[in-house]
Every structure is written in C-alpha cells, then in structure tokens.
Image (cartoon, rainbow, N blue to C red):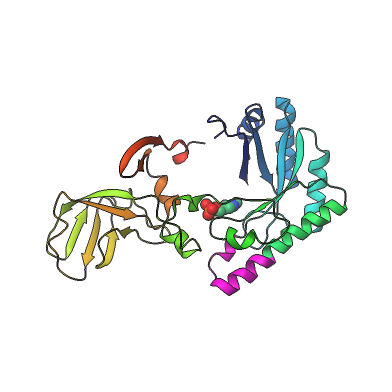
C-alpha cells in the first residue's frame, strides 16, 4: 500500500520480530504507518527498532474489548502501557484501538448491545488516558460487520472495515445485506454425469468454504455443493439440461477474505468489459 502511494496506513495488528520491526521503522520514510501494541515486552521491541533505524513509529495501544484475542485490558493497564509508549524513544503514541469481532455473531438487538458495551470500554479508556494527560488522537475499532452500529458511538475516530468492500454471503449475513456482490469466481462445467449433477472446475483451492459455501449465480435450485480440491459438485433439486459441459458458472464466495488469497490476479469489470487486471500482492504467506 505504501509503495502504491497510500500515505496513511493503520496496520491493525502487532508487528513482531526484529526484521519486521526494523522494516516497519524504515517504512515511515515512505508513509505514516501506524501499528498496534498490547504489551510492554512488545512495545520495547518496537522502540528498539525505531531507535536502530533512527525513525519514530506511531503506535496505537490495542485493547481487548471482549473478543479475547489480542489486546491489553481496558482501564488502568492500558493507561500504564500508553504512558510507557508516550515516553519511549523511537515511538509516538498515536491512540488506541479495539476490535469487537465477537459481536458479529449476534442477532440485531443483542448485537447492538454487545457493540455498545465493547465501544464503551474503548471510548472510556481513551477518556481516562486523556485525563492522565496522554494525547489520544486515534480511537479506532469496527469492521465491515459492525461499523454501521459502532460508528454511532461518539468518540470513535476511524473504522477498520475492509473485507466487506467486495460483499459476499458472510458479509451480507453480518450486516451488509444491501450491498451488491462485487466479486465472483468464474468456473466452467467439466461434467454432467446425470441431469441433477453439475461438476465444475473450481474446488476449495479456488473458492474456499471458510464461513460457508459459495452460491452459484443464476442457478436457483442448487440443493447442495461439495468442494473437493479441484472440483465443485453441485446437486440440483430438479433435473436440468443447462448448464452444459463447457458453460460458465459464476460463484459468489461464502467469504471473500479466504477466497481472494487463493488467486494471483483479479479482473476488474465495468459494464461487462474487463477494464483492468489487478495483481493481488498480499495474497501469499510471504511476509
Ligand atoms: C483487528 C481487526 N479489525 C477489524 C477487522 C474487520 O475486518 P473486515 O472489515 O475485513 O471484516 C478485523 C478482521 O478480522 C480485524 O482483525
């Protein structure tokens, strides 16, 4: 992103390991790249990298707002860590972040309550830090499945929504029901063993089934989909002649996050015409 000219970046993650921390420090020469920390141990490593590279790394302290993944406890522990960051060489205290990912699974009313509880922990801790004299600029949280509710909480300054940009079956379920599907995987029918069975040349290596199976556009009577490595097997509820061997079937992924990373490039269409081919540089395990 920095290489492509994006100047303000939040890596909503802890960057660890000497080489990666040093690279992050050097990246500050290209863009303002903010990163997260949730422990003194880690903050010391970031600070050392900033000093080694002669750069200042902007840091948000990550709070666990209920997800139980990364993040320090809200309240006093956060204030203590943020104070350390403020005074550490090679670091700049940029603010706080949280991620209320545990709330996406709830139905509307309960989800709103859970989001409010989570955001209150974040916003109140930001206030506590300010009372202690700590400059808290960024208060960041929320993702594609929560931002519509989280945004309504005063005190949040930015959101971390990303994956929902393409929409898919999962993001629609998590709250973006009005967004159109923007990304499909094109497969071809390779076999029709009988009138209710369609075999396509896309299995889990092309489609993935994390968070749910893909949906075949234009085929309304698909009873089940099974994905093996290179094949997709669709069972129709009613016999049908179409699609025929060689025909194209377009799939909306169950979850674009786990589908996109399986591909090197994506074709960008406007009004049915390919306008560009975008490389997906962050897709692989290379770090
Ligand atoms: C730290 C953090 N923030 C926000 C999100 C939300 O991202 P998305 O909008 O892609 O669901 C995630 C997703 O896993 C995350 O790990």
- Residue 11 percent across, percent down from the top left: 61, 42
Residue 282 image position (x, y, % from top left): 47, 38
Number of dots carrying numbers? 0
Residue at image location 41% in from the left, 46% down from the top:
260
- Residue at 41 percent across and 35 percent down: it is 279
**Compared to 5, does 235 lie above or below?**
below
Q: Quadrant of the N terminus?
A: top right
- Quarter of image, res 265: top left
Work out whether residue 71 or residue 167 is closer to the camera in this orientation and state it: 167
Residue found 69% across the figure and 51% down from its top:
157
Q: Is residue 74 visible?
A: no
User: Compared with residue 204, is residue 219 higher up or lower down, i.e. above or below?
Assistant: below
Asked if 235 appears above or below 51 in the picture, the reply is below
Q: Does 201 sit above or below residue 114?
A: above
Q: Which residues are magenta?
A: 101-117
Indicate the quadrant where residue 106 lies: bottom right
Q: x and y percent of residue 130 in the render? A: 84, 51
Report the front residue among 192 and 272: 272
Secondary structure mostly taken by the magenta-highlighted segment of the chain: helix
Most extreme residue toward the bottom is 109
């Amino acid at each position: 992103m920095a290489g492509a000219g994006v100047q303000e970046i939040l890596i909503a993650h802890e960057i660890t390991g000497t080489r990666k921390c040093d690279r992050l420090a050097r990246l500050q020469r290209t863009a303002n790249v903010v990163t997260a920390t949730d422990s003194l141990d880690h903050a010391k490593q970031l600070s050392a990298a900033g000093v080694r590279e002669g750069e200042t790394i902007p840091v948000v302290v990550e709070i666990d707002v209920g997800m139980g993944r990364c993040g320090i406890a809200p309240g006093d522990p956060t204030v203590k860590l943020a104070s350390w960051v403020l005074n550490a060489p090679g670091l700049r205290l940029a603010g706080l972040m949280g991620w209320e990912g545990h709330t996406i699974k709830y139905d509307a009313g309960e989800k709103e309550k859970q989001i409010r509880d989570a955001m209150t922990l974040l916003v109140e801790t930001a206030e506590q830090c300010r009372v202690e004299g700590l400059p808290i600029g960024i208060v960041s949280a929320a993702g594609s499945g929560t931002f519509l509710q989280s945004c309504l909480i005063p005190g949040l300054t930015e959101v971390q929504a990303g994956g929902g940009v393409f929409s898919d079956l999962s993001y629609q379920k998590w709250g973006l029901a009005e967004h159109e599907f923007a990304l499909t995987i094109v497969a071809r029918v390779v076999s029709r063993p009988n009138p209710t069975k369609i075999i396509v040349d896309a299995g889990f290596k092309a489609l993935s089934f994390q968070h749910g199976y893909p949906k075949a556009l234009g085929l309304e009577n698909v009873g089940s989909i099974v994905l093996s490595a290179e094949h997709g097997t669709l069972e129709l509820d009613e016999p049908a002649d179409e699609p025929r061997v060689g025909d194209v079937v377009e799939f909306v992924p169950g979850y674009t996050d786990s589908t996109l990373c399986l591909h090197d490039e994506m074709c960008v269409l406007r009004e049915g015409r390919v306008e560009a081919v975008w490389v997906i540089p962050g897709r692989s395990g290379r770090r």
